Image (spheres, rainbow, N blue to C red):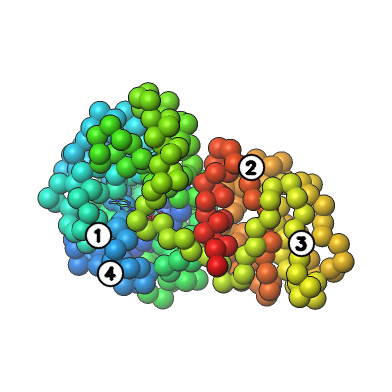
Amino acid sequence: MGDTPNDIQTVVGILKKGGLVAVPTETVYGLAADALNPNACRKIFDIKGRPLIDPLIVHVYSRDQVETLAHWSTAAQRLAAAFWPGPLTLVLPKKAAVSDIVTAGRPAVAIRMPRHPFLRKVLKVGRLPLAAPSANPFGYLSPTQARHVCASLGSRIPYILDGGPCSIGLESTIVDLSTPGHPQLLRPGPITAEAITDILETPPARHLKHCAKARVAPGQFKRHYRPRTPLHLFASGTSPSLTARDHKVKVAWVTLCRQSVSLPTGNRNVATFWLSKSGDLNEAAHNLFALLHHLDAQSYQAIYLEKMPAEGIGIAINDRLERAAAS
Ligand code: TXA
Ligand code: MG
């Protein structure tokens, strides 16, 4: 599963025949298919158990490739120039080459140019745009290592390209530019609303923040990214109150940094973890899904997790955590 030319050729060969491959990106692992082959894309929904109403992101190698799929605007070109390749997805009016299965019948397509060198090689050698959602069963934790994919979908996909742990560890920011003059933030992510507004320069700091509440991506269900173990959030800098039952069973207690809050007392079965020794939010994002995968594979009866400060990538982490903890 390394990055020898052979592996890339094998991956490209599978994709060209309409097969699926799990690929590394800098955000999370994706389950990729030829975006121009509707039958191949249909398999993604089948294997993930994903509803057909939830559209797919198309990954491209170059900005030229975007021309074949969607209509660019000045705003889109400015954002692409600033953040691609990288963790930003742009929703743009689609062209006829993109089938309804990819966009779930919508007139706009979500496009991203990823940064991971292995995936860039696959895109370059294959000369195919790749539709790829996160490579997890629908609703479950996103995979940030090849073994996370292997554990959940390994028996159903022919190849996992192992590119090591994803450097960012959290899904891309999604900005909808399909209505001229009204950019909308559909999913907070590693690139903040402020950074996007700085590039757009139009008054829409307001729009972006307002719409972050008003609208979300169609597939952003209230319950999502969930571990099997019940997850409870507690406010940043506070101590969680455990239930009477939790005092008797094995629970995991996760904080942002090492000494951020004091340990809940009276329970010898509490195991403590932190997402970043120094409280660095980017490191916390990088570790988040990997730690939740690890805890979910142990016999904890509950996970208590401290919410992040609402700044920078902390906003996106909290968005995922709230969905993961939603009942
Ligand atoms: O970082 C990422 O974005 C990762 C990697 C693999 O690229 N992909 C990812 O895909 O997170 P997925 O399918 O797990 O989440 C994509 C989100 C969904 O909420 C989906 O509804 C939304 O993007 N989306 C896709 N196409 C869209 C469209 N045409 N219009 C609006 N939202 C769209
Ligand atoms: Mg996903």
User: Is 240 in front, or is 44?
Assistant: 240
- Which corner quadrant holds the C terminus? bottom right
Mark 3, Cα crowd under 10 Å, few <14 / some 14-19 / many 20+, is few
Mark 4, Cα crowd under 10 Å, few <14 / some 14-19 / many 20+, is some
Image height of 195 relative to 14, above or below: above
Determine contact: label 3, label 2, CB under 8 Å. no
Q: Nearer the viewer, mark 4 or mark 2?
A: 2
Image height of 126 relative to 83, above or below: below
Residue 8 visible, this angle? no
Q: Which residue is mark 1?
A: 104
Q: Which residue is mark 3?
A: 241
Element type at mark 4: helix
In the rendered structure, the answer to whether residue 147 lies left or right of residue 4 reads: right
Q: Nearer the viewer, mark 1 or mark 3?
A: 3
Q: Which residue is mark 2?
A: 309
Q: Earlier in the sequence, mark 3 or mark 2?
A: 3
In the rendered structure, the answer to whether residue 12 lies left or right of residue 133 reads: left
Corner quadrant of residue 180 = top left
In the rendered structure, the answer to whether residue 176 lies left or right of residue 308 reads: left
Q: Nearer the viewer, mark 4 or mark 3?
A: 3
Residue drawn at (69%, 42%) of the image:
279
Q: Amino acid at mark 2?
A: Pro
Q: Earlier in the sequence, mark 4 or mark 3?
A: 4
Q: Which residue is mark 4?
A: 43
Q: Earlier in the sequence, mark 4 or mark 2?
A: 4
Beta carbon of the mark 2 residue lies under 8 A of ligand 1: no
Element type at mark 2: loop
Q: Amino acid at mark 3?
A: Ser
Residue drawn at (47%, 60%) of the image:
222
